[in-house]
Amino acid sequence: MILCSRIAFPSSLVTIRRGRVLLIALVALFVSVLARPALAQAGARQRRDAITIEGTVRDSTGHPIAAAFVVLEDERGSRRADTKTNTDGSFDFSTDQVGAYKVRAEKLGMGNSATNLVVLSGVRIRHLDLVIETSTATDSASSDKVSPSRSSPTTMEFQDHPNFTVAGVTDWSNVGLHGADTSMRTSETLAQETLALKSGSSPENSPGAPNGAAILRDTHQSESNLRAALNKAPDSFEANHRLGEYYLAAKTPRDAIPLLETAYRIDPVNQTNAYHLALAYEANGDFTAARNQIRKMLANGADGANVHHLLAEAGEQSGDSLLAVHEFEIAARLDPSEQNYFDWGAELLLHKAPVPAVEIFSKGSAAYPRSARMLAGLGAAYYASGSYEEAARRLCNASDLNPSDPAPYIFLGQMEKATVATLPCSVQKLGRLAHEQPDNPLANYYYAVVLWKRARESDNAADSRQAEELLQRAVKINPQFGAAYLQLGVLYSARNDFGRAIPCYQKAIEANPRLAEARFRLSLAYKQRGEESKAQQELQMYKQVEKTEAAEIEQKRKELQQFLVILGGQPAVTPPR
């Protein structure tokens, strides 16, 4: 069933008197003699200006790794220096050129290589700590690292300051983004979807929030009983607090606020009530009140990680992203939990600071090697920094931690859609998802995308046929799957089968009229069939849709502040006005 149908001198210049020749030679010799000290000084100065990179390579448990291979590569992947670690895991090498580099460490027989992105400028010595994950370390860490204490190895990461400083914010620009606009859009989409992986994204799920389910299940805490207790003692802190807590747990913050405010006036020192009041303000969308309440708490001595985390959330929601990223950092320093690592990294990624995000997600992944979302965030950060293959590897690793979780596969599939060459390990991983979830239209679609890319790279007819079958299955499961119809049209057009491609493009537009690519390709298909008027009509529609979409994206980019990041401990700068 078809579901969609590069000097020659004049001779006069050669005849020169010998005396003049001799004079010129003597002058040249005199100048060269005078220049030697200056050249020597310049050479010495250049050697003094050499930038040294030093650091250590350790495994996930903090033990040094000897004889690990450490490589310095430039942005184009060209090797600039390499060395091996000493018995204590230390290494160092030098370069005299500033710029963006990748430092990679690996050792035969161990797990994933460790990679750190670094910008060398101004600072003569850079220190890097690299972590190579091992399967053994990963397994052991997962069994005893559920909730780290202050003395646990995970806190070692925060004894050193990060290799960056968020110095300010500015309006959006494409600085730091790589590739065509398609890659930029994919990067922005991945940042938003990474943000969606935050378990504490809703205020009532924030650390320190009341256990709503437990409260609501407790028959002794029924609304009527709590209301009766309040009627009996309206000036009671306990009665106001408990009923306010009940409404907050029931996700009706508007009802909770006046009760918690009354309890706060009665006892402003009670930190639990003060915190729940801030939660209620934030849940009700009053982020200014939430920020003011948290600042009162901090002034009264409250300094817990959950308080700083909530202030960070309120700061982000009220448009103060600089406050948010600083408070997320404080929260992670006070409590290096998996969530605080992740939320800090997600904030950096969201505001176009991919290199710092790579650093934080890398530390978080080393501390919590069983966290699939940390690896997914790390993959998204690597993609935003232009390291597409590194990004894919992290997402493939994330999919192995929980093979049934579709999030890492979706991230990987979106990257495949935006890159030209097939990414490493994506065929295998996306194929696994399609095999295990045959009724998932996204699983079929993304596996078809990667098979189609491989088919075009190797002229593999079998891959092409399988991609077609997968896409047809996807649109059968979801008849409104515009992207799958579009991909089917692309497949048929590559076979010059425009009779089948055109209906697919049309169905893609029916499912999503704002799908600009479908209109553009439909215009090309009509042109190939000699239907010029239809081709021109679709081309005009494409231009209109694309213009509208570009304007909307540009507006969103302007509304989202971009962090100004100073790398390697350089002095902070004032953001431009």
Image: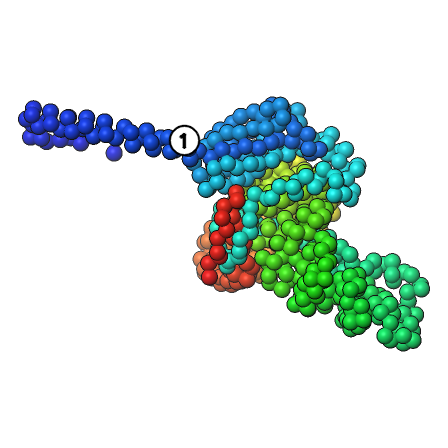
Q: Quadrant of residue 258?
A: bottom right
Q: How many marks?
A: 1
Residue 419 on image: x %, y %: 54, 43
* Residue 66 visible in this rendered orientation of the protein: yes
Q: Which residue corresponds to the image point at 59% horizontal and 53% vertical from the top-left?
A: 350
Residue 472 on image: x %, y %: 66, 47
Residue 142 on image: x %, y %: 76, 37
Q: Report the side of 492 relative to 371 (left or right).
A: left
Badge 1: residue crowd in 10 Å (few <14, some 14–19, many ≥20): few
- Depth check: give the residue in front, 218 or 184: 218
Residue 576 on image: x %, y %: 46, 58
- Depth check: give the residue in front, 493 or 554: 554
Q: Quadrant of residue 506?
A: bottom right
Q: Which residue is mark 1?
A: 47
The coloring applied to the image is rainbow
- Depth check: give the residue in front, 379 or 520: 379
Kindly identify the amino acid type of the residue bearing the numbered disc 1: Arg
- Say above or below: 219 vs 407: below
Q: Quadrant of residue 450?
A: top right
* Residue 498 visible in this rendered orientation of the protein: no
- Depth check: give the residue in front, 161 or 209: 161
Q: Does dot 1 land on a helix, a strand or a loop?
A: helix
Q: Report the side of 571 relative to 60 (left or right).
A: left
- Say above or below: 38 vs 419: above
Q: Which residue corresponds to the image point at 55% horizontal and 49% vertical from the top-left?
A: 165
- Say above or below: 142 vs 574: above
Q: Which residue corresponds to the image point at 82% horizontal and 65% vertical from the top-left?
A: 245
